[in-house]
Image (tube, grey):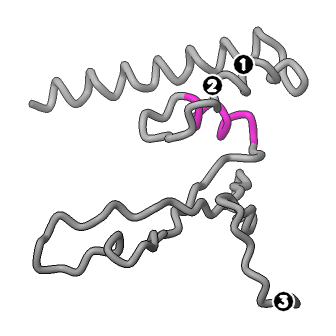
Amino acid sequence: MGKWDFSMDPVHEWVDEGEEDAVFGITLRREPVPPSADPAEPSSSAFGCVQYHAVKVRRLKAGTLERLVTHLLDPESREPDFVHIFLSTYRAFTSPRTLVELLFQREETFSNLETSVSSCR
């Protein structure tokens, strides 16, 4: 159907975003919009159609070792499989000793930060 062909695939790889020390892959995922609970608003189910909206998913694809470790420890990271993938593949680009040293350095940094914040209070 040409360039305007709309695929019904629920997931589309869209673009890569580069930052200083990382590359993120952007995926658009199509999700159904839940029907409105407001009785004044017309319901789409009355017409037999489902509405969708696009959700942007940002996943870390590549980066420096320090950035990967930071992402690994980031509680805001919403990649449930990142830890599993990272721990399965890290030996391809670093040694276990280097990784453990980086993890302990991060822990020391956070401990020192918490101590300084506590002493300021």
Pointer 2 or 3: first along the chain: 3
- Residue 68 is covered by the magenta coloring: yes
Q: Residue at x 77, y 46 (%)?
A: 62
67 displayed left or right of 35: right
Neighbours of disc 2 within 10 Å: few (<14), some (14-19), many (20+): some
Disc 1 marks which amino acid? Leu
Circle on res. 87: 1
Q: Residue at x 27, y 74 (%)?
A: 43
Segment tinted magenta in the rendering: 64-72
Of circles 2 and 3, the one toward us is 3
- Residue 41 is covered by the magenta coloring: no
Disc 3 marks which amino acid? Lys
State which quadrant residue 44 falls in: bottom left
106 displayed left or right of 27: left
Q: Residue at x 74, y 34 (%)?
A: 65
- Secondary structure of the residue carrying tag 3 is helix
Answer whether labels 2 and 1 touch (C-beta < 8 Å): yes
Disc 2 marks which amino acid? Val
Location of residue 95 in the rendering, given as x and y in whole percent from the top left corner = 83, 15
Q: Which residue is mark 2?
A: 83
Q: Which residue is mark 3?
A: 3
